[in-house]
Image (cartoon, helix red, strand yellow):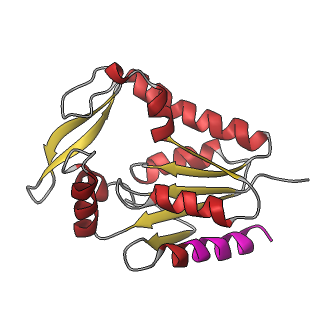
């Protein structure tokens, strides 16, 4: 019986997850659907969220804070509607997997607790869990050059995203090329699903 193949990518903003996911889609011989929280955020009315550094009671917004070293950062605040959207992403993944679609899930989960929520949701499926990393200074350079993020959001995520998470493999999008990382994931998948 055919089971869905699922690749779960977790990493901070600007770590290169989207580019990696799109390249994996191009590379795999079988079709893979690429889903992630950003796609669901695009479904939301813009007025529900605030990406300019102000507070949004219902949706997603950036909260100013400082990290343990005193650097200014922005942290994600999720209101009740945002939390519902986050849970819905898991439901969508389960539905698609149950329909035997192969998936690439792109996420920014904060540490072991949130990744474990995914592992619980997808417990009936074989999932390759991939940690996507890059050095902090490179994340901050990418964040600055993108121009569509609150400066300090990458730093705010950097210290939390991989905290105590056990992945099947980890890739570094700075020290290795896109093609090297794609090949590492392909090799891991081949071992994983044979």
Q: Is residue 142 left or right of 96 when viewed as pictured?
A: left
Residue 103 position, x and y percent, is 66, 50
Residue 190 position, x and y percent, is 73, 73
Residue 194 position, x and y percent, is 80, 71
> Which of these two is toward me, 39 or 12?
39
Residue 30 drawn in magenta = no
Q: Vertically, is 27 above or below 120?
A: below
> Which of these two is toward me, 191 or 148?
148
Q: Residue at x 36, y 24 (%)?
A: 46
Residue 149 position, x and y percent, is 26, 46
Q: Residue at x 45, y 40 (%)?
A: 38
The number of callouts visible is: 0
The stretch in magenta equals 182-194
Q: Residue at x 75, y 64 (%)?
A: 29
Q: Is residue 36 left or right of 149 when viewed as pictured?
A: right
> Which of these two is toward me, 151 or 82?
151
Residue 131 appears in the figure = yes
Q: Vertically, is 62 above or below 146?
A: above
| Residue 64 falls in image quadrant | top left
Magenta stretch: helix, strand or loop mostly? helix
Residue 189 drawn in magenta = yes
Q: Residue at x 80, y 46 (%)?
A: 100
Residue 159 appears in the figure = no
């Amino acid at each position: 019986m055919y089971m869905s193949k699922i690749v779960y990518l977790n990493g901070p903003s600007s770590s290169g997850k989207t580019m990696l996911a799109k390249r994996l889609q191009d590379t795999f011989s079988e079709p893979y659907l690429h889903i992630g929280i950003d796609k669901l955020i695009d479904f939301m009315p813009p007025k529900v969220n605030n990406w300019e550094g102000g507070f949004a009671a219902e949706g997603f917004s950036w909260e100013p804070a400082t990290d343990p070293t005193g650097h200014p950062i922005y942290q994600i605040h999720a209101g009740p509607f945002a939390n519902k959207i986050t849970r819905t992403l898991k439901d969508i993944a389960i539905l698609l997997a149950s329909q035997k679609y192969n998936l690439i899930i792109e996420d920014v989960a904060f540490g072991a607790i949130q990744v474990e929520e995914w592992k619980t949701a997808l417990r009936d499926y074989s999932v390759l869990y991939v940690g996507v990393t890059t050095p902090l200074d490179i994340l901050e350079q990418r964040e600055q050059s993108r121009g569509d993020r609150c400066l300090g959001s990458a730093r705010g995520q950097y210290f939390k995203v991989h905290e105590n998470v056990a992945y099947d493999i980890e890739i570094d999008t700075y020290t290795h090329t896109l093609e090297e990382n794609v090949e590492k994931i392909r090799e891991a998948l081949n071992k994983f699903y044979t």
